[in-house]
């Protein structure tokens, strides 16, 4: 378990396994047997629960919520999810500031894992730095170079190791309002493409679930510009396309 390690709680392997669970389970469901797909999901989810990998469990939960909403309510629900995510990207700094200052959150954080406490302090630090350059930001990939020696949590522990571990805050911190607007538009475009595909509702719901799961991980871990994380997005998109595109005779 990585429960008390602030740097490896959200480990890469568990997250990738959780993200790939959706398309792989879809393939198993359609080409083998639904019961096998359900068993696969149960085994993987149980293993991730034992690892205490918060990001992987969050991705499964957010993906499941998106899947159920889109499968039941169709494209309007998918569009609402895209709009909400885009809105959270735009409003991330003030929302995070209110979140970190909430007494309820502070009380809950007392018994939270070290990684959670670290992120709350980190996000509070980031919102302060955003306020110093709110319009154009500090520059792309500038997170790792911001002065922060005065805010160290320990002699060997920076308050922000390399990046904010939150995609919305990192984009606003580094690219300011132009980056936020472009990112929100990109998210809406992705969801519009997913929802306008000429596919059955089940396949559309799977695609919306995977997009939501990937974005949820970006909200708590990893840097926006990390090459491997961008590569995961492309690999995941290709796998989802294989899993949800009907075979031609």
Image: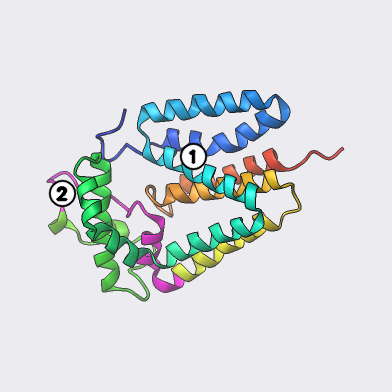
**What residue sits 59% from the left and 50% below the top?**
208
The magenta span reads 152-179
Q: Residues within 10 Å of mark 2 (few under 14, many from 20)?
A: some
Left or right side of 22 for 56: left
User: Which is in the foreground here, disc 1 or disc 2?
Assistant: 1
- Residue 154 percent across, percent down from the top left: 13, 46
Residue 111: in sight, yes or no? yes
- The correct choice, above or below, for 9 with respect to 89 in the image is above
Position of 45 compared to 188: left or right? Answer: left
Where is residue 102, by image quadrant? Answer: bottom left
Question: Which residue is nearer to you in this view: 12 or 103?
Answer: 103
Q: Nearer the viewer, residue 162 or 18?
A: 18
For disc 1, the marked residue is 60
The alpha-carbon separation of the residues under discs 1 and 2 comes to: 31 Å
Local crowd at mark 1 within 10 Å, few (<14), some, or many (≥20)? many
**Among the 4 quarters of the image, the one containing residue 80:** bottom right
Q: Give the farthest residue toward the front.
A: 72
Q: Secondary structure at mark 2?
A: loop
Q: At 69% across and 41% down in the image, what residue appears?
A: 244
């Amino acid at each position: 378990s990585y429960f008390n390690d602030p740097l490896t709680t959200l480990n890469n392997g568990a997250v990738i396994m959780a993200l790939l669970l959706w398309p792989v389970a879809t393939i198993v469901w359609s080409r083998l047997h639904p019961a096998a797909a359900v068993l696969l999901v149960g085994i993987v989810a149980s293993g991730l629960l034992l690892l205490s990998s918060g990001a992987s469990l969050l991705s499964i939960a957010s993906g499941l919520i998106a899947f159920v909403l889109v499968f039941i309510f169709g494209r309007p629900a998918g569009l609402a999810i895209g709009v909400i995510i885009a809105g959270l990207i735009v409003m991330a700094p003030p929302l995070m500031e209110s979140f970190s200052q909430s007494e309820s959150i502070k009380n809950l954080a007392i018994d939270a894992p070290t990684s959670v406490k670290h992120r709350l302090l980190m996000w509070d630090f980031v919102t302060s730095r955003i306020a110093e350059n709110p319009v154009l930001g500090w520059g792309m990939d500038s997170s790792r170079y911001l002065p922060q020696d005065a805010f160290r949590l320990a002699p060997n522990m920076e308050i922000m190791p390399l990046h904010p571990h939150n995609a919305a805050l990192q984009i606003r911190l580094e690219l300011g309002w132009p980056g936020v607007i472009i990112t929100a538009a990109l998210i809406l475009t992705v969801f519009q493409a997913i929802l306008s595909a000429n596919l059955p509702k089940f396949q559309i719901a799977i695609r919306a679930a995977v997009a939501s799961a990937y974005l949820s991980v970006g909200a708590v871990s990893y840097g926006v510009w990390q090459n491997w994380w961008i590569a995961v997005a492309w690999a995941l998109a290709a796998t989802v396309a294989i899993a949800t595109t009907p075979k031609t005779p």
